[in-house]
Amino acid sequence: MVSHKIENIKLSQKGKNRVDWARQNMPILQSLKRRFSKTLPFRKHKISICLHVEAKSAVWVETLMAGGAEVAITGSPGSTQDDTAAYMVDKMGVEVFSWRAENYEDHMENARQVLKAGPTIISDNGGDLHFLLGENLDQTQSNSIIGATEETTSGATRLREELPKFNFPTIIINDTMAKRIVENRYGVGISVVDGIMRSTNIMLGGKTVVVIGYGYCGQGIAQRLRGLGAHVTVVDNTPLAQLEAHLEGFKTSTVEKALPNAHFIVTVTGRYHVIQARHFDLMRDGVILCNAGQNQFEMEIDTIYDQAERAREIRPNVEELILPSGKKFFLLARGNSVNLAAGDGNPIEIMDLGLSLQSLSLEFLASRADELVPGPQTVPWEIENSTVKAAISEWVG
């Protein structure tokens, strides 16, 4: 059996059922799988992946393996489907290092393990694999990685603003309008509201909800919440985003002015500590907090737990935390991405499009990485256009 570190290999059959259902609803990837099985674009490649380990990702990995790839994968805290991880190890032969209850330190160690697998290509989600490579840049400059992809807004920001320069190209999937509009606005908008409803079973109509961050994900979340009758206030420190939210009919404000009236607070910025411990004095008693960004550090999570006098899980994915003052608040999914940690993530068909963009970008890297300049860059237009046309063919007819 391949190298792995997962929760329980005996969950494999349940994982198979999940993956079977996802596969039936991902026709674009199935078409690519048939083509890849003939052309074998990845036959000389080991692909190390950091992406949520769940059924849709398993179908994607099947597609890459049909093209000849060997694959090692890790997920993110709180979002791994342990049964899917078991199926990927047991029946697919994938090196998986991930389990649902892992914390951030576990996650980073698992990311190190997939890099130790000796990849020639990496596919990142949030920039964590790139971050680890950057810790030992001298070694990175001489290793065998020919190229990479990065899935998210937050990862692209880290690559362009924070991390060192690498000697290979990284294609940013989130630079495509297809990803931003279809996956971020529609997919995340739907799945975040689903995660909130599953966690709380509380009516959203009539509630005041503060959405912090008005990029494409924030837009989708705000629109879906309003559609359910919530009174939505948008907070974003970018002038154009403020203006756009205003023209869309949302109330706009600052964090400090918006928090006192909020029943729900949703962070979706891709930035660190947009909610800090000092903000809790501003919040009403019983406020519900959740994060829809890449990781829990959009909130000052360690300080939040340190300051809480008592904490208990009052229902699955809902923690009640009580401050020394007696004020209480409720945190969903321990601050992890609520759509994945408390739900199933984006709808299957939407990820069929998103992961097809990934597959074609990886194929492009496998054949043409030496033609590209090092550093972050956009998905070639031809790849985006062909993927959108495939989605139209399947969804519209």
Image (tube, rainbow, N blue to C red):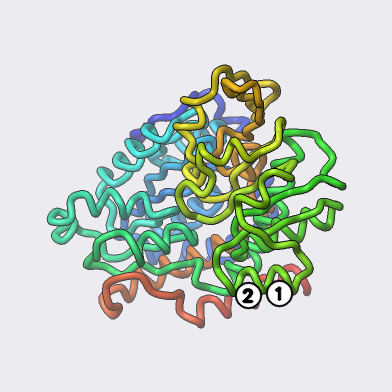
**Regarding mark 2 in the picture, which secondary structure is present there?**
helix
Asked if the residue at tag 2 contacts the one at tag 1, i.e. Cβ–Cβ closer than 8 Å, the answer is yes
Residue found 66% across the figure and 31% down from its top: 330
254 or 137, which lies in front? Answer: 254
Dividing the image into 4 quarters, which one contains the C terminus? bottom right
- Whether residue 29 is visible here, answered yes or no, is yes
132 left or right of 285 in image: left
Residue 29 sits above or below residue 70 on the image: below
| Amino acid bearing label 2 | Val
Q: Is residue 324 above or below residue 222?
A: above
User: Residue 120: where, in percent of width, then height?
Assistant: 28, 58
Closest to the observer, 58 or 176: 176
Image location of residue 332, percent across then percent down: 63, 35
Task: Say left or right for 49 vs 298.
Answer: left
- The residue at 53%/73% (across/down) is 176
Q: Quadrant of residue 6?
A: top left
Image quarter hosting the N terminus: top left
Quarter where residue 198 is shown? top right
Q: What residue would you read off at disc 2? A: 388
* Image disc number at residue 392: 1
Tell me if I can see residue 19 in this picture: no
